[in-house]
């Protein structure tokens, strides 16, 4: 198959793309664009696709409020959240070499929830809400490190990592419930809606600040990305081809937590996207990390866009958190995976 | 470990005494604290003109009794689940049984407008049966049979599904969040004795059947093949254990919401005390379960008085670290 490999800085950075990847990515890009436009045009009042297109390109101005202030940031947010979760899941699955790992099952998401709910309960009003992502990322980071430390016993086996993640996330969820029940009704409702995973009130300022947070891990992923493919082959092998395993594992874990924590900070607990997107992507293209990451991001974006679209149109005028629908698709998918890998 | 039958008997009697003591303490502790001697008086000669007796009779008695019965049930459900799946990490809540029962109850409240207590109970049984059955089926697929990791993962995924559906329904019905949330997170406060009474016949029935399960479970624990060779109808044992789990765990959820980890910890405590004989494990687990839940409830009331910690949160704080300990110990041995 035709492949293109790009190398920079004395081969320190290498990106590889295949012809098949180009085709598959093109198709998913079209799919995401289609759902994106659809989600701009549907809602409590339907705007024809042609008018949406003209509005976005600036030819007419009659739907400015609905499209540009309400729906566009929300759709953008869905795309960002989906991509971030997808890539976070991809990194984590390669890192622990277990197809069933994802940020929500391992407990990173509950750590982020704990960080965010602590912030909402104690910090709201005192500290500006724009630091909420920092709290969520901090919580996720704390959870990830704790899980990693506790499961460490001359190395980390995936099974132990998952089981200990399950246990820790039960404790952290208990802490979250504790704080919810303790705080006043207004805070409770706010936190609860946040926890279920929704992108209700996405605004432009949130979208831009989220982009800044997401930009941080990207350079690391470009530089170290190729090492992730090697990591999948096992630690001993990685050492023998000259990779600093501990350093890379740490960096990848941090990147995954940054991405998942940022997504959780802005959209709450949207579950199972980090599990599904990498699986679908791996089915479709080769294992080269950069290509896989781009495709996973697209698929994640697609899943969250669709889930949010369904969640806010099917039960009109009610608006259901998108997380309910990602779980509705994701949990059966997870059970299917469990069935598929039953002999491992 | 208590080795001789005499020691085990003494242990059993002192456990009963502990449970009675904790029960009376749970009647005594609260916003107005009542001396222990007076709670005893209220039990044997109830005087409706005495304010303290009135407090005990109207609010604290139901609470104490519910903790007592539910603790017992959850612990026994844990024993049965662990025996059935031959998995030391199993517990009704980890297998998604609690989440399933809660989902069906919330569904019944918000969509079918069921409001009778017996209605909740049947939906809880249904949810528990569906969730437990699915996880058991999914976990037992594959060459190795029921491995801990598969059972746990299936339980986690199914719980996540039920929890997010429950959350979705609650977001649609915003005014009930606060009440339902307190109930979901597990609480023994503010429940009427009626709630317990409507479920009680089933729970008592299950308790009685449990006592007859000690022998078959002992045989069953030596493996399917050996049990068959000894003439046991293995499928029947499994079926009865499954039904008991559903009634014990589902009924408990209908009364108190999701109280986790009792079913995980208590069987381990019992086994470390009396070894592997189910004739001792079952009564010990029941009593220990009651003691742990009563103690957790007392602590939950006093730590941040006048507010209360939901008891499900209390048990998760105790049980979560224990689960991690088991996971670390059990899996690294493998």
Image (tube, coloured by chain):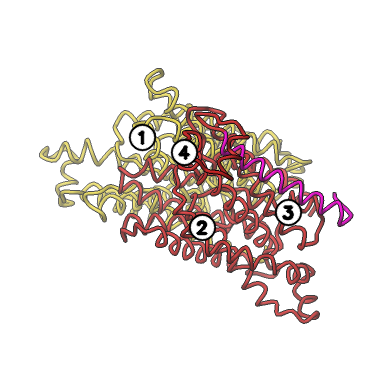
The kind of secondary structure element at disc 2 is helix
Q: Residues within 10 Å of mark 3 (few under 14, many from 20)?
A: many
Circle 2 residue = B158
The part of the image, by quadrant, that contains residue B97 is bottom right
Q: Residues within 10 Å of mark 2 (few under 14, many from 20)?
A: many
Residue A105 place in picture, x, y as percent: 56, 48
Circle 3 residue = B284
Image quarter hosting the C terminus of chain A = bottom right
Circle 4 residue = B54
Query: What shade has chain A been given?
Result: yellow
Marks 3 and 2, how far apart in space?
A: 31 Å
Q: Residue at x 63, y 60 (%)?
A: B150
Between marks 2 and 4 in the image, the one whose residue lies nearer the viewer: 4
Marks 3 and 1, how far apart in space?
A: 44 Å
Q: Residues within 10 Å of mark 4 (few under 14, many from 20)?
A: some
Circle 1 residue = A190
Q: Is residue B211 above or below residue B255?
A: below
Query: Disc number at residue A208?
Result: none
Q: Residue at x 15, y 52 (%)?
A: A48
- Chain identifier, red in the render: B
Q: Which residues are magenta?
A: B1-28
Query: Is residue A70 or residue B21 the one in the foreground?
Result: B21
Residue B173 appears anywhere in the view: yes
Instruction: Say whether residue B3 is magenta.
Output: yes
Residue A167 place in picture, x, y as percent: 62, 44
Asked if the residue at tag 2 contacts the one at tag 3, i.e. Cβ–Cβ closer than 8 Å, the answer is: no
Between marks 3 and 1 in the image, the one whose residue lies nearer the viewer: 3
């Amino acid at each position: 198959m035709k492949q293109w490999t790009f190398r920079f800085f004395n081969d320190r950075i290498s990106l590889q793309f295949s012809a098949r990847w180009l085709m598959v990515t093109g198709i998913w890009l079209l799919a995401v664009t289609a759902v994106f436009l659809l989600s701009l045009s549907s809602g409590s009042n339907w705007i024809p696709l042609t008018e949406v297109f003209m509005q976005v390109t600036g030819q007419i101005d009659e739907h400015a409020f609905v499209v540009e202030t309400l729906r566009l940031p929300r759709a953008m947010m869905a795309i960002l959240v989906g991509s971030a979760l997808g890539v976070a899941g991809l990194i984590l699955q390669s890192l622990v070499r277990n197809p069933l790992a994802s940020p929500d099952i391992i407990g990173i998401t509950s750590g982020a929830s704990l960080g965010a709910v602590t912030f909402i309960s104690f910090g709201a009003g005192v500290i500006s809400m724009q630091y909420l992502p920092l709290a969520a990322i901090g919580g996720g980071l704390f959870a990830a490190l704790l899980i990693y430390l506790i499961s460490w016993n001359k190395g980390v086996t995936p099974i132990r990592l998952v089981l200990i993640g399950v246990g820790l996330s039960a404790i952290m969820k208990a802490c979250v419930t504790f704080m919810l029940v303790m705080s006043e009704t207004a805070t409770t409702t706010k936190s609860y809606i946040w926890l279920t995973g929704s992108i209700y009130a996405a605004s432009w300022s949130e979208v831009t600040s989220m982009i800044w947070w997401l930009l941080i891990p990207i350079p690391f992923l470009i530089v170290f990305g190729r090492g992730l493919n090697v990591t999948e082959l096992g630690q001993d092998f990685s050492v023998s081809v000259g990779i600093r395993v501990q350093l890379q594992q740490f960096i990848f874990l941090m990147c995954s937590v940054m991405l998942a924590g940022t997504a959780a900070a802005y959209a709450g607990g949207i579950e199972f996207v980090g599990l599904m997107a990498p699986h679908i992507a791996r089915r479709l293209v080769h294992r080269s990390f950069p290509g896989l990451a781009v495709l996973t991001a697209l698929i994640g974006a697609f899943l969250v866009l669709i889930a949010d679209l369904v969640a806010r149109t099917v039960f009109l005028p009610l608006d259901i958190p998108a997380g309910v629908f990602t779980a509705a698709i994701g949990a059966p998918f997870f059970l299917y995976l469990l069935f598929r890998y039953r002999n491992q | 470990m208590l080795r001789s039958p005499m020691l085990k008997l003494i242990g059993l009697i002192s456990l009963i005494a502990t449970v009675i003591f904790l029960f009376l303490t749970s009647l005594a502790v609260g916003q107005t604290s009542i001396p222990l001697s007076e709670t005893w008086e209220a039990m044997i000669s109830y005087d409706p003109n005495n304010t303290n007796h009135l407090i005990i009779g109207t609010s604290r008695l139901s609470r104490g009794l519910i903790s007592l019965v539910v603790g017992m049930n959850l612990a026994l459900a844990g024993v049965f689940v662990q025996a059935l799946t031959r998995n030391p990490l199993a517990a009704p809540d980890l297998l998604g049984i609690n989440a399933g029962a809660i989902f069906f109850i919330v569904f019944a409240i918000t969509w079918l407008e069921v409001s009778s207590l017996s209605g909740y109970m049947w939906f809880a049984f249904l949810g528990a049966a569906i969730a437990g059955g699915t996880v058991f089926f999914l976990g037992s697929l594959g060459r190795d049979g029921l491995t801990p990791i598969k059972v746990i993962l299936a339980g986690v995924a199914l719980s996540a599904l039920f929890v997010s559906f429950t959350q979705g329904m609650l977001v649609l019905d915003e005014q009930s969040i606060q009440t339902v949330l307190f109930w979901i997170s597990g609480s023994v406060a503010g429940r009427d004795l009626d709630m317990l009474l409507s479920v009680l016949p089933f729970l008592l029935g299950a308790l009685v059947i449990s006592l007859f399960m000690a022998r078959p479970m002992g045989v069953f624990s030596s493996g399917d093949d050996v049990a068959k060779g000894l003439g046991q109808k293995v499928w029947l044992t499994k079926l009865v254990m499954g039904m008991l789990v559903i009634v014990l765990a589902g009924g408990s959820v209908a009364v108190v919401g999701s109280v986790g980890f009792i079913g995980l910890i208590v069987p381990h405590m019992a086994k470390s005390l009396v070894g592997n004989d189910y004739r001792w494990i079952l009564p010990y687990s029941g009593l220990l379960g009651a003691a742990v839940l009563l103690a957790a409830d007392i602590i939950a009331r006093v730590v941040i008085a006048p507010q209360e910690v939901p008891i499900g949160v209390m048990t998760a704080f105790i049980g979560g670290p224990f689960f991690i300990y088991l996971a670390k110990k059990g899996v690294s041995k493998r």
